[in-house]
């Protein structure tokens, strides 16, 4: 698929079949994609990967994602056996459909569904409305029923053939080459062939080639039955015995264009809520998805600068530490004597805990940000004197970040702190063991 060079295409509208694509993603990626909290994420990740790729390549002016609902539709009422053979979606898939919708809301992407109608009918109705509003529509789906919607030059179908990356873009000629019939003839073609996935059997012995030949020769179901005598005895018998089934199939397979769904076609551009998007991607542990989304937004010309700025929650005020350098072990003990917990941080020449320790910072007051800096010379002096500082450090409660490195360095001066109570790096790991690193700046 060709990639545009800049900005959004002012005329392109993407309409996605949310359930179809989420379903495809679920069965294309392993279900062992799980967060530390136990949430399976393969369908969400696959759907978002599809979405990012499509947005990057198509850069639409508008996008809508349609979803099925759990209530029976008019097709179930007309045919009780419609989709009756399908097992209920796995719980881990149903959960992820809800997450997909939550992420889309954060991304500022419009969604649509309607009780009593399938997503395909909603898509058909929205496609007509989008064309009326001046858009060129691309329907993105893994459902072949949408082939019937193709209409040059206004509506094309981007069909997901398999996995999360294999797509084919069809115009009218593409549908003819793929099926042997025109888009408008597709319901009749499918009615003859049948659709096992919807529990709608066709005419026994009539496959895709025979169905296409009959349709192109006689124009449709009425034409076929008007010329049934011209067929072989076996085909005549099969067609006559299944006429009611074929006509019912065609009625059920024809998408509705009158679903009472309303969406303002002037308000379908992406309007992301950046902070919420980041929160969800962090929760889902999608480490690169935020960057991919930001890249897509920039390519589409969506200004995320103000959203990024407002999402940080920064007021522009900073707490500036008051740092006092001490020069003797006695001075350190005197200043920290009434501090209930030692909050320490080391500073090294290279890798923490494995290079020369320049010194240690200790918090005197959190309210005033009063901090003392203890150079290495003070520790050297304490080691050579009465070890007041060493004894003090070993007996007091200790807090810090990744304290193991500091404890290793202090051993050089025969200081072995025993009162470690809280390590923010360990705490961060316990909350989210899946991260690669736990730098203090990142946690802040």
Image (cartoon, rainbow, N blue to C red):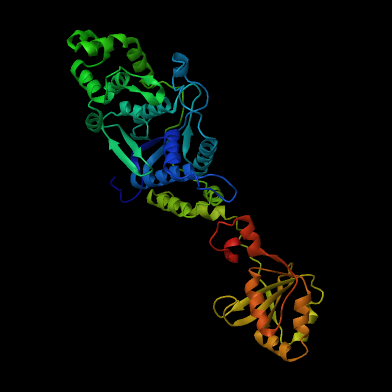
**130 vs 254, nearest the viewer:** 254
- Asked where in the image residue 212 lies, by quadrant, the reply is top left
* Residue found 78% across the figure and 89% down from its top: 386
- Residue at 34 percent across and 41 percent down: it is 10
- Specify whether 78 is left or right of 168: right
x, y percent for residue 100: 50, 40
> Is residue 386 something that shows in the picture?
yes
Q: Nearer the viewer, residue 125 or 28?
A: 28
Q: How many marks?
A: 0
Residue 355, image quadrant: bottom right
Q: Quadrant of the N terminus?
A: top left
The answer to whether 203 is drawn above or below residue 414 in the figure is above
Find the residue positioned furthest to the front: 234
Q: Residue at x 60, y 76 (%)?
A: 353
Q: Is residue 109 left or right of residue 200?
A: right
- Judge left or right: residue 178 versus residue 392: left
Q: Residue at x 64, y 79 (%)?
A: 409
The x and y percentages for residue 98 are 54, 37
From the top left corner, tell me how far across and down residue 316 is, in percent: 60, 61
Q: Position of residue 88 (x, y in %)?
A: 51, 29
Q: Residue 265 lies in what quarter of the image?
A: top left
Question: Which of the image's four quarters has the C terminus?
Answer: bottom right
Residue lying farthest to the right in this orientation: 338
The answer to whether residue 287 is left or right of residue 57 is right
Q: Is residue 268 visible?
A: no
Does residue 29 sit above or below 247 in this rendering?
below
For this rendering, which residue is in front, 388 or 207? 207
In the image, is residue 105 above or below residue 338? Answer: above
């Amino acid at each position: 698929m060709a990639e545009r060079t800049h900005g959004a295409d002012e005329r392109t509208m993407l309409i996605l079949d949310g359930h179809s694509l989420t379903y495809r993603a679920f069965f294309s990626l392993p279900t062992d994609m799980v967060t530390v909290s136990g949430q399976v994420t393969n369908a969400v990740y696959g759907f978002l990967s599809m979405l990012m790729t499509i947005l990057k390549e198509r850069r639409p002016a508008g996008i809508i994602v349609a979803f099925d609902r759990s209530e029976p539709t008019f097709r179930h009422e007309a045919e009780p056996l419609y989709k009756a053979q399908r097992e209920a979606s796995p719980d881990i898939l149903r959960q992820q459909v809800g997450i997909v919708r939550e992420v889309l809301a954060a991304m500022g992407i419009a969604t649509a569904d309607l009780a009593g109608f399938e997503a395909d009918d909603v898509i058909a109705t929205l496609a007509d409305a989008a064309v009326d509003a001046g858009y060129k529509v691309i329907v993105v789906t893994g459902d072949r029923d949408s082939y019937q919607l193709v209409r040059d030059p206004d509506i094309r179908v981007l069909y997901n053939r398999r996995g999360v990356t294999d797509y084919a873009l069809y115009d009218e000629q593409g549908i003819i080459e793929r099926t042997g019939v025109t888009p408008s003839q597709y319901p009749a073609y499918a009615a003859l062939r049948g659709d096992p996935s919807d529990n709608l059997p066709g005419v026994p012995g009539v496959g895709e080639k025979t169905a296409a030949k009959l349709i192109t020769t006689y124009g449709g179901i009425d034409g076929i039955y008007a010329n049934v005598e011209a067929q072989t005895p076996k085909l005549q018998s099969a067609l006559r015995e299944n006429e009611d089934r074929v006509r019912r199939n065609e009625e059920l397979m024809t998408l509705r264009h009158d679903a009472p769904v309303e969406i303002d076609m002037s308000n379908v551009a992406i309007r992301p809520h950046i902070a919420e998007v980041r929160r969800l991607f962090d929760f889902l542990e999608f480490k690169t998805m935020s960057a991919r989304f930001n890249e897509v937004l920039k390519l589409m010309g969506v200004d995320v600068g103000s959203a990024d700025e407002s999402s940080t929650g920064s007021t522009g005020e900073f707490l500036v530490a008051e740092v006092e350098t001490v020069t003797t072990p006695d001075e350190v003990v005197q200043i920290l004597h009434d501090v209930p917990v030692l909050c320490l941080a080391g500073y090294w020449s290279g890798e923490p805990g494995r290079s020369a320790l320049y010194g240690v910072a200790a918090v005197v007051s959190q309210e005033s940000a009063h901090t003392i800096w203890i150079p290495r010379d003070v520790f050297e002096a304490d080691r050579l004197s009465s070890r007041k500082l060493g004894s003090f450090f070993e007996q007091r409660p200790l807090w810090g970040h990744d304290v193991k490195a500091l404890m290793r360095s202090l051993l050089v001066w025969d200081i072995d702190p025993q009162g470690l109570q809280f390590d923010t790096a360990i705490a961060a790991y316990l909350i989210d063991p899946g991260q690669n690193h736990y730098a203090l700046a990142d946690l802040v």
